[in-house]
Amino acid sequence: MAKLFEEGFTQNREISWLRYNERVLEEAFDETVPLFERLNFISIFTSNLEEFFQVRVGSLISDDENGDDSIDIKSGMNPAEQLEAIYEMIPKLLARKDEAYRLIDSELKAKGLNRLSVTELRRDEAKKAADFFKEKIRDRISPIIIKADDEFPMLESNKPYILSRLESSNDGFYAIAEIPSDVEKILVFDEGIHAGGEVRYIVTEDLVKTILPQLFSPFKPVETVGIAITRNGDVPADTDSKNMLKEMKSVVERRRTTDPDMLIVDTKLSSRLEDYLLSVFDLAPSQVYIASRTSYSYISDVRDIIPEWLNEKLCYEAFTPFNQLKLRNRPVMEIVKEEDILSSYPYDSMDPFLELLREASTHKKVKEIRMTIYRLSSHPIIVEHLLEAVKNGKKVKVLIELRARFDEERNIDWAEKLSEAGCKVYYGDEKYKVHSKLCQIVIDDGDDKKYISQVSTGNYNEKSAKLYTDFSLITYDQRIGKDVDDFFEDVFKNKEGEYKHILTSPKTMQDTLVKLIRREADKGKDGRIFIKVNSVTDVRLIEELMEASCKGCVIRMIVRGICCILPGIEYCTENISVVNVVGRFLEHSRVYVFGEGEDEVMYIASADLMTRNMTKRVELACPVYNTSLRNRIKAVLYLNYIDNVKGRVLTSDGTYKKKPAGNKKTDSQQMLMKQSQVV
């Protein structure tokens, strides 16, 4: 295993991820994508990169600084070598991003959506901008003047700041100011919004950068730049803590003061200012990058001000997910007793599940509602239904994973609110994050209990259900229900169990997947494996897939992001093909299919094929027994697989290439949207 990289069919996960994010950036250059949506892909690319530095780069830096010289068995690189490879790729990616930004910004202006610089403002606009700064910003911003040898103020991660080098007798003074996060990110000049003319606006960050240095009197700014740092977000929790809620609050606080691992500046720095910043942030030159902007958070605000007449030219056509309940004028709790309900988000709406919760919160025979929660929206309808259930005397047991990275604060807030309302709240296993997405309604059916179980590949987040592709299965199958009942009993007690139908990690999932891969491998050329996940990194599963390929088994994979297995390597992975789809929606569902015909086995799951999902998290995979539903799911996967518009093929060198368009263009997401509207 230590020499896996020498066999030539694996790649480093970090490099693979950067190549995926490069794929995201490609959408910003795609002229078939509406112009404003191309701008949004730049924002997605940037936020992805920030999180990559917070989590993956931060972790590698920690390993390197701690003297960890261990070799990545998939690439043969130690932490220092991985960092070097990452740092070499970033400037090229950022330069490409800036190229896209300049191109799109210019084209948006030509279409009538004009982002202005301060020097481009008309006289009346300049007055409005000055008044806006005076009334809304001036008293909210507190520049700090510091000497070169003073302690530098603590800056928040991924927030835009304005920094000036000041002229003085010894040239050793600087000024730093944070742009308030709760003020409008853009100032709009109303002229063309309703009249069908030009829409003109200025980004608050640009306005502040221009005006603020005028307030540093008696000092004179000689150099002003926008900056943003990214801090190491990989702050482990103390799993031995007796109070996990308190410990996670501490994690959130500690993350605010971790070491920076990236600095973005919007202007080339003088050698003096660069040396100063390298010193105060303790960074190497390879960790400082020049980009056209330090923040793209303003983009969502611009979307809100695009007038209707312009929206149809610049944005995706509005799409309303299909509500399956319109076909069935009956309660969900009655429907599911006769047939399973499968939802394919975002083409289907989340309404069947939300309605199930609403019905259960008042139904006289419902005794208990149980859920595992990993991420929620900011104003979750789900929580409203759970609180209503408590008011109506139902037992509500919720496991909220407080360690969901970067959602810790939100989860802490909801955990406290649910607990205060009377819900029984659990905080997850001490050793493993609980990443499963599961809900169960317990019904008192006379002398027996009956179960309605809901299993999802994605989070219980009403917002992301409109943006992420996921599957949700609501079933009255008591075989599944009994397993899920046992699972909840175990997970609430931090126990690991084995079940007849569902798979769970870290107990049974990886072993069962290995058995199923080997089953198909033993069929030789008649073996079939079809997998859709977000990432593939687990060495054991990678080796098993390679062995199956060597025996002739046909393996098709749809992998959105990291893929450490390289397809098409002779005598190793020549029977494996991997495609990637990046489009309007984020591909997020996880599905495993083994075999064809009568021996076909299918699971929908919360787990990717990553070591953390297989051995370090509590995950769940649910079998899909209904043939009709399996066919529906495979139809979605098949369209993804043959997509030659938004799909790309992963090559044996780890890069992506476009599929030949042929005579027929297949845009899987576009086709699935159209199909969802046909009743």
Image: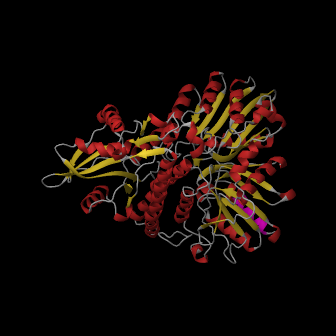
Q: Residue at x 30, y 33 (%)?
A: 134
Check residue 32 for magenta coloring: no
Q: Nearer the viewer, residue 653 or 621?
A: 653
* Residue at figure coordinates x 76%, y 33% from the top left: 325
Percent position of residue 368, x then y? 69, 30
Dominant secondary structure, magenta: helix
Foreground pick, 605 / 95: 95
The quadrant in which residue 389 appears is top right
Image point 73% across, 45% down: which residue? 674
Based on the picture, tell me whether residue 520 belongs to the magenta stretch: yes
Quarter where residue 458 is shown: top right
Q: Left of 323 or right of it: where is 2?
A: left
| Vertical relation: 377 (above or below) 422 | below
Q: Where is residue 398 drawn, in percent x and y?
A: 61, 35
Q: Residue 470, relative to residue 445: is it above or below?
A: below
Residue 532 locus on image (x, y percent): 69, 56
Q: Magenta residues, as a range?
A: 511-521
Residue 410: image location, x then y, percent? 50, 38
Please state if 87 lies on the left or on the right of 569 as rendered: left
Q: Quadrant of the C terminus?
A: top right
**Would residue 126 be found to the left or right of residue 383 on screen?**
left
Does residue 462 sit above or below 502 in this rendering? above
